Amino acid sequence: MSKPVFGVTYDYRCPFARNAHEHLVVALRGGADWDVEFTPFSLSQAHVEEGGLPVWDDPAKAPDLLAIEAGLVVRDEFPDKFYDVHLGLFTARHDRGLDLRDESVVRDVLGAAGVDAGDVLRTVADGGPHQTFRKEHETAVANHQVFGVPTFVVGDKAAFVRIMTRPGDDASGAAKTIDAVLALFDDHPELNEFKHTSLSR
């Protein structure tokens, strides 16, 4: 059987993206045999009204893009540190309640992961990660009509998915959760939306 190849979008502000990407990283670290593309998506851009100034061209929105752009530098130049930074940025936002628009917060996450924050932020300032972010976001929208996070992209199919749990350190459980999502693409293409009306607490 060939290795599953798929992408998953993220924006660090979304708690459901946090849940999905924790499952992905925990499972991958536990040996899950997947080829995953971590695809940035800007919720700020998704909420720009038609005809409005794109966030990519609005200097006032630069802080909204900072954390993802820093993460992209790590993803592309220091891949062995990416999982730590990726989860660290989600943790800073959702577990610690910090503002990822604050450069010092991003610096702290990078440093805790053993990445030279100065080098990363200088690369961000050069503008390359900004263009990468824009291209990957716009490609996801153009090719797959992506509107939010997390969206799973498998081949020419895409689905917005909300995973309600966090995996903790259960790599096996995390892998089963993601495998169940992937199975829906092939096994139940007729299922477009399945949403519980209430949640057990």
Image (spheres, rainbow, N blue to C red):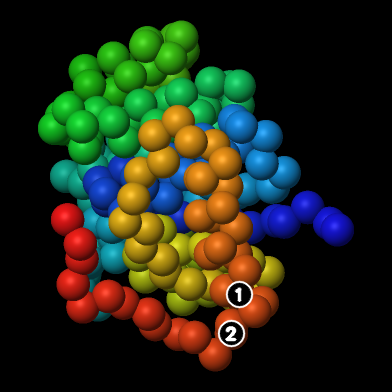
What is the number of the mark on residue 56? none
Residue 173 in sight here = yes
For this rendering, which residue is in front, 21 or 163?
163
Q: Residues within 10 Å of mark 1 (few under 14, many from 20)?
A: some
Q: Residue furthest bottom?
A: 190
> Can residue 134 be seen?
no
Residue 155, by quadrant, is bottom right
Considering only vertical position in the picture, is 40 above or below 98?
below
Q: Is residue 70 left or right of residue 14?
A: right
Q: Are marks 1 and 2 in contact (CB under 8 Å)?
A: yes
Report the residue marked by disc 2.
Answer: 189
Tell me residue 140's x, y (percent). Answer: 51, 65
Amino acid residing under circle 1? Phe
Residue 180: quadrant of the picture: bottom right
- Under mark 2, the amino acid is Pro
Residue 41 position (above or below residue 142): above
Q: Residue at x 38, y 17 (%)?
A: 110
Left or right, 151 with respect to 58, comes to right
Q: Residue at x 56, y 52 (%)?
A: 176
Q: Secondary structure at mark 1?
A: helix
Give coordinates of residue 195: x percent, y percent: 31, 77
Q: Residue furthest right?
A: 1
Q: Which mark is residue 185?
A: 1
Residue ID at (53%, 64%): 181
State the SS at label 2. Answer: loop
Quarter occupied by residue 66: top left
Residue at mark 1 to residue at mark 2: CA–CA distance:
5 Å
